[in-house]
Amino acid sequence: MNKRKTVGLLIDDILNDYSQAICQGASFAAEEAGIDLVTISVGEMFVQGSNPDWKNRHYNAMMHYPQS
């Protein structure tokens, strides 16, 4: 049995037109390649005034996860 690969896409703001076009293109490309795509909106992590410890911890966790 062949296991499908999964790719994550971190996107800043899922609601703007540019980001939606990126998501759509990535989705089509992943489907053609037989890859599962997981899209995560991280825009709130970078809101000015948010707790830097919280955003750094979560950002670092997301960046470390693919290397595991």
Image (spheres, rainbow, N blue to C red):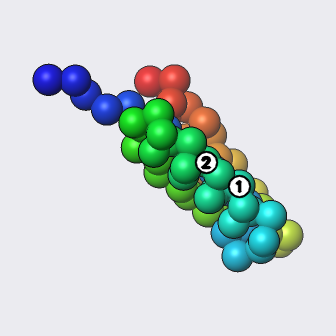
Q: Secondary structure at mark 1?
A: helix
Q: Give the percent coordinates (x, y) of residue 64.
A: 55, 31
The answer to whether residue 57 is visible is no
Report if the CB atoms under discs 2 and 1 are less than 8 Å apart: yes
Residue at position x 55%, y 50% in the image: 28
* Residue type, label 2: Ala
Horizontal and vertical percent position of residue 30: 50, 42
Q: Nearer the viewer, residue 3 or 57?
A: 3
Of 33 and 11, nearer the camera is: 33
Q: Amino acid at mark 1?
A: Ile
Task: Name above or below for residue 1 compared with residue 22.
Answer: above
| Residue hosting label 1 | 22
Q: Which residue is mark 2?
A: 26
Percent x, y for residue 8? 52, 43
Residue drawn at x 60%, y 36% as measured from the top left: 63
Q: Residue at x 77, y 73 (%)?
A: 16
Is 10 left or right of 51, judged from the image as shown?
Answer: left
